[in-house]
Image (spheres, rainbow, N blue to C red):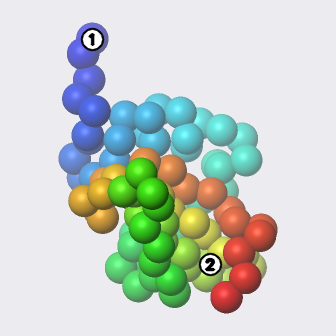
Amino acid sequence: MNLPDRLPPPPFWRTRYFALSVMARPDRRMIDPIMVVSTLNAPFRKEREPSGRIRHWGWIDDLNQWLRVVTLDDGQTVHNAMLDRDFSP
C-alpha cells in the first residue's frame, strides 16, 4: 500500500511519520489532537529550525506541561509533537 507523505485533515495536515510512528509511542499517547491544534492556532513561541521546519510551543493546562509541535516548512503539516520538559519561556 502506497500512502502519501502528507495526510489531510481531520484532525489536521500531518506526515505519515507523525500519524503512524509518533502517536504510537507510549510517551506520546497522552497528547490529544486538540492539544496539537490549539498549539498551532495560538503558539506561545515559534522558531524556525535550520532545516526549515518550524517549532511551535504551547502550554497544556491538562498536562501542566509545554507541548512542542514541529511542522514542515509550510507551517501547517505536523511532523512531530512531544512534551518539552526543557522549554523555558
Under circle 2, the secondary element is strand
Q: Residue at x 51, y 86 (%)?
A: 44
Question: What is the number of the mark on residue 51?
Answer: none
Mark 2 belongs to which amino acid?
Ile
Q: Secondary structure at mark 1?
A: loop
Q: Is residue 60 left or right of residue 72?
A: right
Residue farthest toward the front in the current orientation of the protein: 50
Q: Is residue 34 above or below residue 29?
A: below
What residue sits right under mark 2 in the picture?
Answer: 60
Crowdedness near tag 2: few (<14), some (14–19) or many (≥20) residues, C-alpha within 10 Å? some
Query: Is residue 83 visible in the rendered structure shown here?
Result: yes
| Label drawn at residue 1 | 1
Query: Where residue 64 sits: x, y (%)?
Result: 74, 79
Mark 1 vs mark 2, CA separation in Å: 36 Å
Residue visible at 27% across and 11% down in the picture: 1
| Relative side of 25 to 86, left or right | left
Locate residue 19: give its quadrant.
Answer: top left
Q: Nearer the viewer, residue 38 or 6?
A: 6
